[in-house]
Image (spheres, rainbow, N blue to C red):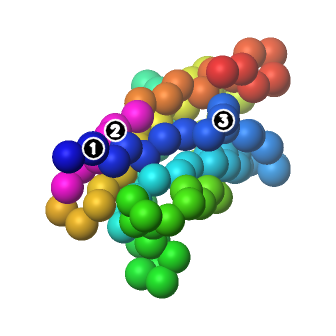
Amino acid sequence: IIAALAIFNQDPEVRIKGDKAEIRFHISGPLTHIKVENCVEGTENCVTETVMIPQKTRITRETVRTVYDFMTTVALVDSKVKRLLFSFWMYDGDVLLTSHPTVVKINKGEWEF
């Protein structure tokens, strides 16, 4: 039995719009849903989202991998925010395929990975 894994196709893209940061991930795999938690480091400002993948676009082992665009937005509390902490859990039904912690750093107004 070949284990099916969800993968990140490339580094996340970040755009700052006012006091919000938009983070877009490109993900492929046999996913039914993605749960993501993002937190501003040093605060209790956390958001947990669950994104369902429509059944008609679900990937099976027999089909070509498709890339999902997943975007999440987090509010920047103030200019002192230095890091955003992201944790992803990717599921196929009730089966956890993979998890992926990511740290997004802010440095002098620039974003680094």
Q: Secondary structure at mark 1?
A: loop
Residue 98 colored in magenta in the image: yes
Position of 100 compared to 81: left or right? left
N-term-proximal mark, 1 vs 3 = 1
Residue 3 rendering spot, x and y as whole percentages: 27, 43
Amino acid type indicated by mark 1: Ala
- Magenta part of the chain: 95-100
Position of 15 compared to 80: left or right? right
- Give the CA separation, mark 1 to mark 3: 21 Å
Q: Secondary structure at mark 2?
A: strand
Label 1, on which residue?
3
Amino acid type indicated by mark 3: Gln
Position of 40 compared to 23: left or right? left
Q: Residue at x 73, y 40 (%)?
A: 13
Label 2, on which residue?
99
Position of 32 compared to 66: left or right? left
N-term-proximal mark, 2 vs 3 = 3
